[in-house]
Amino acid sequence: MSNHKPVVIGVAGGSGSGKTSVTQSIYQRFSDKSILVIEQDYYYKDQSHVPLEERLNTNYDHPLAFDNELLVYHMQELQHQRPILKPVYDYKLHTRSDQVIHVDPKEVIILEGILILEDPRLRELMDIKVFVDTDADVRIIRRLMRDINERGRTIDSVIDQYINVVRPMHLQFIEPTKRYADIIIPEGGQNRVAIDLMATKIQTILNRKESN
């Protein structure tokens, strides 16, 4: 492991925007290098002190749902070449699991999540800030398919959640963070040109750091 700080890329965007596709596409370009993905979803707050009935009403699209204190600390530790114990979230119990994942620092860190650009402390840690911008109709269709096929939910429950929680939270908190992005990628993982440019930029930064 070299002594220079890792390259940190933030990948933000609404639910169903294609953030994960973009992240995985970049990750695969550097499979022969040292690259790590940190998902903001792992950093939802511990709610073990809250009754289960109340946990069921958790708004996972609100900035206050995330333990950004811990996320910032972990990102700083990784930047200083120190390993972390990444938390695991239990979506069935709506609280943090007892499990943790040992994560070693790497040359490139992709920080992915709906609200990673909302917190100035996280933005400060990023070398490149990306916002994946996808039309609302595409995002709702992707969310419908995912929640029905992978999470066993009904169409009515997904649409109800989208109208009452996901859409208003997107408009209030997620969409405004687009202004902090260095790069806006329309249509997510389908945008091969943007992903090629991203990979080239990351490689340039890595080469510059290695030569210093």
Image: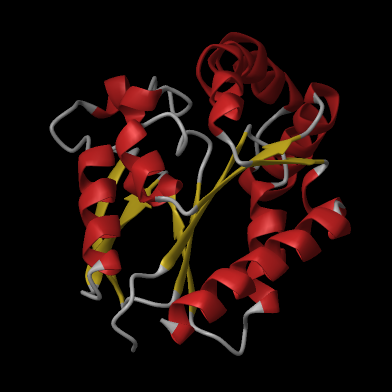
- What count of labels does the image hold? 0
Q: Nearer the viewer, residue 81 or 17?
A: 81
Residue at image location 55% in from the left, 15% down from the top: 165
Above or below residue 54? Residue 13 is: below
Asked if residue 57 lies left or right of residue 20, the reply is left
The quarter of the picture where residue 53 lies is: top left
Residue at image location 47% in from the left, 35% down from the top: 117
Q: Residue furthest left?
A: 49
The quarter of the picture where residue 194 lies is: bottom right
Asked if residue 193 lies left or right of residue 179, the reply is right
Above or below residue 48? Residue 212 is: below
Q: Position of residue 48 (x, y in %)?
A: 18, 38
Evaluate whether residue 186 shows in this view: yes
Asked if residue 61 lies left or right of residue 199, the reply is left
- Image quarter of the N terminus: bottom left
Q: Nearer the viewer, residue 116 or 41?
A: 116
- Image quarter of the C terminus: bottom left
**How was the colour assigned to the protein in this rendering?**
secondary structure
Q: Residue furthest front?
A: 212
Q: Position of residue 154 (x, y in %)?
A: 70, 29
Evaluate whether residue 98 shows in this view: no
Residue at image location 49% in from the left, 83% down from the top: 34
Q: Nearer the viewer, residue 155 or 105?
A: 105
Q: Position of residue 188 (x, y in %)?
A: 77, 46
Residue at image location 86% in from the left, 59% down from the top: 192
Above or below residue 36? Residue 59 is: above
